[in-house]
Amino acid sequence: MTLKIGVIGTGAIGQDHIRRLTNTLTGAEVVAVNDINLDETKAFVAREKLGAKVYDNGQELIRASDVDALVVTSWGPSHAEFVLGSIAAGKPVFCEKPLATTAKDARSIVDAEIRHGRKLVQVGFMRRYDAGYRMLKAALQAGTIGEALMVHCAHRNPSVPDTYTGDMALTDSFVHEIDVLRWLLDDDYVTAQVVNGRDTRRAEGGLRDPHFVLLETRKGIRIDVEIYVNCQYGYDIQCQVVGETGIANLPEPMSLLLRKDASLSQAILTDWKQRFIASYDVELQEWINSTRDGEVHGPTSWDGYFASVTADACVEAKRTRAIVPISIDDTPAFYARR
Amino acid sequence: MTLKIGVIGTGAIGQDHIRRLTNTLTGAEVVAVNDINLDETKAFVAREKLGAKVYDNGQELIRASDVDALVVTSWGPSHAEFVLGSIAAGKPVFCEKPLATTAKDARSIVDAEIRHGRKLVQVGFMRRYDAGYRMLKAALQAGTIGEALMVHCAHRNPSVPDTYTGDMALTDSFVHEIDVLRWLLDDDYVTAQVVNGRDTRRAEGGLRDPHFVLLETRKGIRIDVEIYVNCQYGYDIQCQVVGETGIANLPEPMSLLLRKDASLSQAILTDWKQRFIASYDVELQEWINSTRDGEVHGPTSWDGYFASVTADACVEAKRTRAIVPISIDDTPAFYARR
Amino acid sequence: MTLKIGVIGTGAIGQDHIRRLTNTLTGAEVVAVNDINLDETKAFVAREKLGAKVYDNGQELIRASDVDALVVTSWGPSHAEFVLGSIAAGKPVFCEKPLATTAKDARSIVDAEIRHGRKLVQVGFMRRYDAGYRMLKAALQAGTIGEALMVHCAHRNPSVPDTYTGDMALTDSFVHEIDVLRWLLDDDYVTAQVVNGRDTRRAEGGLRDPHFVLLETRKGIRIDVEIYVNCQYGYDIQCQVVGETGIANLPEPMSLLLRKDASLSQAILTDWKQRFIASYDVELQEWINSTRDGEVHGPTSWDGYFASVTADACVEAKRTRAIVPISIDDTPAFYARR
Amino acid sequence: MTLKIGVIGTGAIGQDHIRRLTNTLTGAEVVAVNDINLDETKAFVAREKLGAKVYDNGQELIRASDVDALVVTSWGPSHAEFVLGSIAAGKPVFCEKPLATTAKDARSIVDAEIRHGRKLVQVGFMRRYDAGYRMLKAALQAGTIGEALMVHCAHRNPSVPDTYTGDMALTDSFVHEIDVLRWLLDDDYVTAQVVNGRDTRRAEGGLRDPHFVLLETRKGIRIDVEIYVNCQYGYDIQCQVVGETGIANLPEPMSLLLRKDASLSQAILTDWKQRFIASYDVELQEWINSTRDGEVHGPTSWDGYFASVTADACVEAKRTRAIVPISIDDTPAFYARR
């Protein structure tokens, strides 16, 4: 049984996902697409020789009888309405991050889903599907390094575009660590602190860079994350878990070891899109498989909501220089982790 | 258009390939299977809920009208007859290595294919599809280290079963290097030398172990390969290309960096099946794609024949202790590399 | 001209230094020794066939006319009196860390030395003489990674003895980072924060472990240091400097790369005495050389005082959970760095 | 008791050794120097403020009553006569490599020393004093990787001067591996083979480059060494020992790990003088110490003779393309290893 999918939003990531679903993954077929830019969408469908119908209205697409499940890859501020529409239609929906642009909107999705009575929403936090993070989680679960006590991370971009402003280091970049570390540690956050110091002169437009964030978890694990988005040298994601009996590091991406020009070296990626590219395939294939089984195994709307609340606390912590509590209800039984 | 595949041979590797074609890859469907052991095949088909028809005769399966292409994963000595049958039927065939158990039989396949007039055969040398070897070839093609001058390799297994005897280090293990290095260097071999010295006491049944093989290519590149199949510590494939301006090493498989027990370490695989497991998926997906386009992009029957002639020369070089010429016709235009 | 040295304190480190001065280094001779335990000292002198005179009074040894310079390796609480005695006698003195057990006592040494009018005191912070830290400082000075913005460190011991209690992680272990990072960055600290979280169950006697310390420098550089003294796996000192254009890590100590037991590994030291053993030779040889030139090039008594004030601030920060200012006068011109 | 040393030859290496003996090492004093270029020697002595007497005749210096031991660092072809002179005078002598420029001359030194009845000669093969090679030998002796079966090495220079011609890759560069591997394995060589293939276009003056040498030892260990003296990228010495239960690699020289310019890298040395610079100190200090004890612990004249015979066999093997036996008497009891 092939899963028939409607995709809302055919920008860069939407097009990538459509190609994935069509040419690489198995068990799914894109039957409907919609975008605010109708002409470009039609051109794309023609160019890729897709058999998909083009809708000029997202909610109509959601309700189409031949659409089994939705992929929402539209502009961030429109995510909430399409996810809510999918829940209203009782259809499974994969929503790219963010689930919503405010914690309040994310919460309304959580509430609607609980009212509906069955989980339908998966959020596109793809790092959970990265082979390296999975190795790290497997090692923790196997007790390879004992109980986790601290986690040291870095999230580094070579540079950022002019549109990257204000607190996006926290709300846009760091949000990936927020989700993946909760999953990795199977834990929740209780406080946040943000430290700024000497800024790189490579940052433009008054951006503070780097940030240093400290999170405390319910179990007492201390997490620190350097977020440095003008580091010049590469796109570099580091994660080191300090355990009671040893320490484990996220693997470096595989690359050739070169001896050249007085240097023993391996390449560091510079394009963030390459770093987790394989994760997108795994993420969507597992979503197709679990959706066909009527289940949601990936990041839930509760996870999306938790990420939103945590990011908001970090923004406040940055502003106030204080250690800010992360206030959130206990995880509803509906979203209990297995 | 889905490629309809008949699989001959449902042992371990055959079952793996059937599962791949059915659950992981896209664009193909297994519609027919055959094996010398009919009952087990029927049980497998039922267990996996496959829609494939079970044939009690391989040649009959080849000729079945709904079979577009063949996958031959039967017992090695039967490969030649099924590949020849596929050529006779004018159908594309993917044959697990070896293409044939003698150079003479491999040559007869080459001859039959040339007579047929169109390439139909791909041999299952999966290392060409490994991400690491592909990085290495891309670096060579990009001139990253200049022209290749020497290649140092190692092929190490932790241990081998009792059935691993005589010259299998050359004919069964080393044959992978024979193929992948010809492809990597885009070159052919002209001489072979085999050196034995101090044997490990871990080898059983009088096996000589390790071997050290030297190959010389048409361009003058010198290749040396340690083949050590009782190395105890892991399954470890090393390849270092020495170029005019630098040196490149095949990447280590990705793994966690651990600090534990007074050691900074990363795991080495011990199971050979894990080392190239991702390559099988890539290999078969690319075979499906090119077959649907009516082409053969992977290792040809000429490559299979060349590997067979080279392995024979190594066996003779081991016996005689001499530098043995590798005598083979020039590559027919039919098989010219692009 | 051989430098004639008197050594006060012939415990473990004192004996090591005497052997160094006698058998390994050049330009010095131990002519006088003193220890609270006179019999053991005499036995040591006899056993090592030293030509040194044994004194039963440290201050008398300091004033002996054939003693050019002092090495103080006695019990910590006695350091201040012997250093002050050396200053009173106008003789150069190398004092093992700590310079004094209270900031007040360290300050009194600073004041006495300034009154004396010429620098005489060097403190035994040996990490400044480690080849790795020197590479790191050279890279910073060469601009290899641009201006430093953040520093991430770890100080890990496999375990600690029963005598290691209370805040010794800060006053005894971390004090090495306090000194070496000031030297590395050529900067001073302005605030300290200490974070405790989940403690390892391997810590005994109610010890909090690990600690996480944040320091802020005058230039705004943010330093974080994990101090984890029951990490089980080894004695491991990490230091990573994040610069404007790149990142540099303190080298790992040299060791064999092994492929063994399904692991690609190199040894991590477990004995802290081995980690900086070569630094002690460099430190004392450079001290001999500069002392013969009438100069002090190593860590001064101001550095010892600054370390003491910083450690006190960390202890208070740990107790109060607050960000604690490090209040200290500006560096006197007398101690200005070159 | 200070060892009083006469140095013959005050070129670059001679001056380095004189500075070492005077400023860095302990227990020795240079009291006499000689060189074919008398004026430059006098200038050097004055410049370095040495208390040494300048001799215009090497043999006279050897016989001077205040000279306890000799260091021969003159032009290679003169080594034999000064070493023979030292033996005739019954004085210990440290001779830089080569011991002699022909195997015949080296043999005459061996014979003279045996006639004298006590070992006096040490040859300057400094790699035996390198910390990395010593780690490797210690691991072998400890059984860390079981019995050695194969050794894979590389000896790479970035480039060579115009004066580097003919077979110097074998007689001048490879000779270091010849000595250090005999010492490492505690074994002797029985055959040699030399392979040339595709030459780098960076080699000038018709030089063949790289070479690939295969040695077989008495125990059957197989050694292969790539000698590549125009590798462009650095001075790089590699040594990997393949044992029955594991594999050990010579450590890389310590260096900073950098993340910069899309690369995770560490520096490779380009100047051969830096690679083993610490070994020279260890070598001469141990020579001083053992000489004061009346013993020779380092490479003997037999080792120098063996190196010469092996290098000659390699030159012949290169010329003939054959596997050449290394014919040499059994080690005389006089030179038996402990």
Image: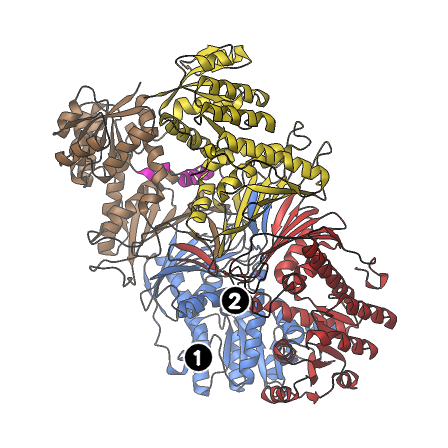
Chain colours: A red, B blue, C yellow, D brown
| Residue A194: x %, y % from top left | 66, 53
Q: Amino acid at mark 1?
A: Val
Disc 2 crowd, CA 10 A, few/some/many (<14, 14-19, 20+): some
Q: Nearer the viewer, residue B330 or D315?
A: D315
Q: Main secondary structure of the magenta part?
A: helix
Which residue corresponds to mark 2?
B131
The residue range painted magenta reads D125-146
Task: Give the number of the disc on residue A292.
Answer: none
Q: Is residue B28 left or right of residue D96?
A: right
| Residue C179: x %, y % from top left | 53, 37
| Residue D241: x %, y % from top left | 43, 46
Is D337 rendered above or below residue A53? Answer: above
Q: CA distance from mark 2 to mark 1?
A: 29 Å
2 vs 1, front mark:
2
Q: Is residue C99 left or right of residue D218?
A: right
Q: Nearer the viewer, residue D91 or B151?
A: D91
Q: Residue at x 57, y 74 (%)?
A: B284
Disc 1 crowd, CA 10 A, few/some/many (<14, 14-19, 20+): many
Q: Amino acid at mark 2?
A: Ala
Magenta segment includes B244 = no
| Residue B322: x %, y % from top left | 32, 58
Instruction: Classify residue A112 by image quadrant.
Output: bottom right
Q: Residue at x 28, y 33 (%)?
A: D19
Mark 2 belongs to which subunit?
Answer: B
Viewport quadrant of the N terminus of chain D: top left
Task: Give the number of the disc on residue B110.
Answer: 1
Task: Say whether residue C262 is visible.
Answer: no
Q: Secondary structure at mark 1?
A: helix
> Quick check: marks 2 and 1 in contact, CB under 8 Å?
no
State which tag comes first along the sequence, 2 or 1. 1
Viewport quadrant of the C terminus of chain D: top left
